[in-house]
């Protein structure tokens, strides 16, 4: 190839490279004097008419049980108060000391029993008896005889067998300064203050404990030999020694019921007259017959002694009741217990059971006799109940009449002292 051909070839190649790329075919030429315009864009389609739909109905809320909101939690309890300090233990005296409120029949005989049993009496209170008169009344007794020891009044004190006893003459228990004489056990023998509320004034005045010498409407009741083991020193600082008749009947009923069973029974006490009766006819508001002359009559009277047995022997509650005949004797009474037995028993077996009890667990409380005795034979007897084996009778093996004697003054006063000693023995 010549040099000229190479140049031409290069020119041709350059020209070819400068030509535009082939595109779409050009439109056909328009006629003269006409302007070629791009076709207008197609009109937009008409908008579709909007169909307004009704707003959707709200869906009904599901029916639910009305649930009350839970109550707010209670506020936290306040912190517990600090425990109280332990109570101070009452000092336990080294020996039993006794104060007596009321220097009547029972009060004076309790003092005699204390002297015989070696129990120290530190004070006596009675607003109605002068100290010199106390000496006279204690020294001379128409029923129990003259006191065999020495009795005097010196330096404001009653002196009995060289034992000095402070004398007070306060009208109300709360006024008696028991603390001044060492807080003794107090024997309430006025016959006036019988309830827990009335006798609690003794405790407030400094008494250690109180024994009421009569049935009480609400104080715990005890009969020695029967239920003294029920005494609780932690909760009982005021107790009742029941009545003289209950002290006679309860030991008898206890033995019979435990050995043979008592279905039911009636009690009659033939009872000596007491200071509450009249020497001659006089007024008596509660029971007219009680106002008749005590020395002249046998007087039917009421008594709660049989029912009170149900308080000391719960198994006999509602099974016994009774009455009294007041008779013209100064002292010693007798109980007649007529009862139906649960188990057929010959009278000889009853006598044997009573004799065994008198020699055993109830020695000193219950006695047994087969002698031909009468009431004055028991004046000054210290037992609560003396079973008279020869006086009792039996209709058959389940229906019997049992007889038991008691010194309603001196036997009862000895039980008061025994109860005091027992209570003191339970002090911790």
Image (cartoon, helix red, strand yellow):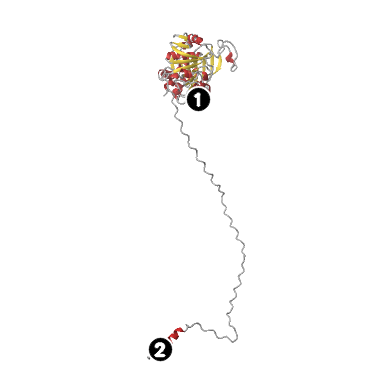
Q: Can residue 263 be seen in this view?
A: no
Rounded to the nearest angstrom, the CA distance separating label 1 from label 2 is: 158 Å
Q: Where is residue 72 drawn, in percent x and y?
A: 53, 44
Quadrant in which the C terminus is drawn: top left
For disc 2, the marked residue is 7
Earlier along the polypeptide chain: callout 1 or callout 2? Answer: 2
The one of 205 and 150 positioned closer to us in this rendering: 205
User: Residue 317 has which mark?
Assistant: 1
Q: Can residue 108 be seen in this view?
A: yes
Relative to 347, say whether 30 is above or below.
below
Relative to 353, say whether 155 is above or below.
above
Quadrant in which the N terminus is drawn: bottom left
Q: Would you call the spot at circle 1 few (<14 residues within 10 Å), some (14-19), or many (20 or more)?
A: some
Q: Where is residue 152 drawn, in percent x and y?
A: 47, 9
The kind of secondary structure element at disc 2 is helix
The kind of secondary structure element at disc 1 is loop
């Amino acid at each position: 190839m010549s040099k000229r051909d190479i140049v031409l070839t290069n020119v041709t190649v350059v020209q070819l490279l400068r030509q535009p790329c082939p595109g779409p075919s050009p439109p056909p030429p328009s006629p003269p004097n006409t302007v070629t315009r791009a076709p207008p864009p197609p009109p937009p389609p008409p908008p579709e008419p909007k169909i307004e739909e009704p707003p959707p109905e709200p869906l009904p809320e599901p029916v639910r049980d009305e649930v009350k909101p839970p109550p707010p939690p209670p506020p936290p309890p306040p912190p517990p108060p600090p425990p109280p300090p332990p109570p101070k233990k009452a000092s336990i005296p080294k020996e039993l000391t006794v104060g007596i409120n009321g220097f009547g029949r029972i009060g004076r005989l309790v003092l005699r029993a204390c002297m015989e049993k070696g129990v120290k009496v530190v004070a006596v209170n009675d607003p109605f008896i002068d100290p010199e008169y106390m000496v006279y009344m204690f020294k001379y007794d128409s029923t129990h005889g003259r006191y065999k020891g020495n009795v005097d009044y010196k330096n404001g004190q009653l002196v009995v067998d060289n034992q000095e006893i402070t004398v007070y003459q306060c009208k109300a228990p709360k006024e008696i300064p028991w603390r001044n004489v060492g807080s003794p056990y107090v024997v309430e023998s006025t016959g006036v203050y019988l309830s827990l509320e009335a006798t609690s004034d003794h405790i407030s005045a400094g008494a250690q404990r109180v024994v009421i010498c009569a049935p009480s409407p609400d104080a715990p009741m005890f009969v020695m030999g029967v239920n003294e083991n029920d005494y609780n020193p932690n909760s009982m600082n005021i107790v009742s020694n029941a009545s003289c008749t209950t002290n006679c009947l309860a030991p008898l009923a206890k033995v019979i019921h435990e050995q043979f069973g008592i279905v039911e029974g009636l009690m009659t006490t033939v009872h000596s007259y007491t200071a509450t009766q009249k020497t001659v006819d006089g007024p008596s508001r509660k029971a007219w017959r009680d106002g008749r002359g005590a020395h002249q009559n046998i007087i039917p009277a009421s008594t709660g002694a049989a029912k009170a047995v149900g308080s000391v022997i719960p198994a006999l509650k509602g099974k016994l009741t009774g009455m009294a005949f007041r008779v013209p004797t100064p002292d010693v009474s007798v109980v007649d217990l007529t009862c139906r037995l649960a188990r057929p028993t010959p009278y000889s077996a009853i006598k044997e059971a009573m004799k065994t009890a008198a020699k055993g667990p109830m020695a000193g409380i219950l006695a047994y006799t087969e002698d031909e005795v009468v009431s004055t034979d028991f004046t000054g007897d210290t037992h609560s109940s003396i079973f008279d084996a020869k006086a009792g009778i039996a209709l058959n093996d389940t229906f019997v009449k049992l007889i038991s004697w008691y010194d309603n003054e001196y036997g009862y006063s000895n039980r008061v002292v025994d109860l005091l000693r027992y209570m003191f023995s339970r002090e911790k």
